Image (cartoon, rainbow, N blue to C red):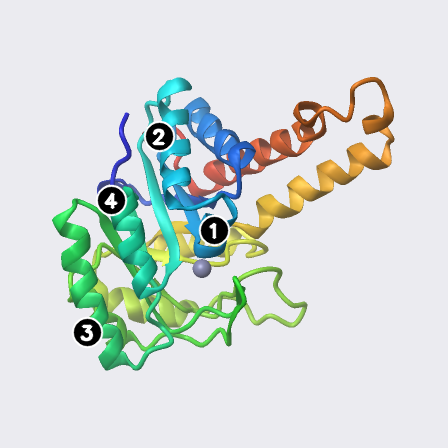
Amino acid sequence: MALVSATEMLQKAVEGHYAVGQFNINNLEWTKAILLTAQEVNSPVILGVSEGAGKYMGGYDVVVNMVKGLIKDQNITVPVALHLDHGSYDHCYKCLEAGFSSIMFDGSHYSIEENVEKTTELVKAAHDKGVSIEAEVGSIGGEEDGVVGMGECADPADCKKIADLGVDFLAAGIGNIHGKYPANWKGLQFDVLAAVQEKTGTLPLVLHGGTGIPDDMIKKAITLGVAKINVNTECQLVFAEATRKYIEAGKDLEGKGFDPRKLLAPGYEAIKAKVKEKMELFGSVNKA
Ligand SMILES: [Zn+2]
């Protein structure tokens, strides 16, 4: 199947009361692990690419062609969206040009007026190409490619303002943060989420910073309209852990254990297991 926009899969998720995972990719192993797992459990999937990861992989054309190549050669038939994560204004256009099927414009650091102006323009540019677009209101805390947010909660009235511009799904800060959560984290602010949903109706909502949010909070967020959950750090942690164990056990020194196909295999399998676990938790299994 060709790349699809994320609009239809997320509208279905809202109706079916489940969420689709956005799993960020960093390289070939990551991408293959996520796509093959989605196919195995028959789940729709969104591949997230941050600007930093896009640069790391060699550029957006590399990313688009790698993903399209894997879909073709690995016979992936579940819906796959390729999504720019936290895109700046310029990079949104670069990804539209390169063939991404979904973009996020992170205008949360602009004033609401400027966020509205730029979002309006990008909604048109994306929709002209059949590409879905996510916007963000209320900066999501933690660090994302060097941009540090404070984890503020979104103003529901601002959410309504941005939703009305025609974005396909909306990220609203509800106390969630990127990366590992601190021990004194207060948890998701469900009253804010409920107030946002009341204003935005059936528009799919997005939960960033999915790593370390307790399962029961994830499930509750889904009941309040969250239909897309971003997972990034968690895959990085299990990949690093599995790779470290392999090396600490001295396996890279045995026979041809240094072969990258062997060295990276435990991390690859760890990502597969984590993605499967998340798809089961989010309820997207067999929803392709
Ligand atoms: Zn994010």
Would residue 258 be seen by someone viewing this image from the given angle?
yes
Q: CA distance from mark 2 to mark 1?
A: 18 Å
SS state under label 1: helix
Which residue is at the front of the view, 85 or 168? 85
Q: What residue is at 22 percent from the left and 70 percent from the top? A: 118
Q: Which of the four quarters of the rendered structure image does ligand 1 lie in?
A: bottom left
Which x, y percent locates residue 198?
24, 67
Q: Which residue is mark 2?
A: 68
Mark 4 residue type: Glu
Q: CA distance from mark 3 to mark 1?
A: 27 Å
Tell me which label, 2 or 4, sits earlier in the chain: 4
**Vertical order, 284 against 106 (above or below):** above
Tell me which label, 4 or 3, sits earlier in the chain: 4
Q: Which residue is mark 4?
A: 15
Mark 2 residue type: Lys
Which x, y percent locates residue 58?
47, 44
Tell me which label, 2 or 1, sits earlier in the chain: 1
- Image depth: mark 2 or mark 1 in front: 1
- Image depth: mark 4 or mark 3 in front: 3
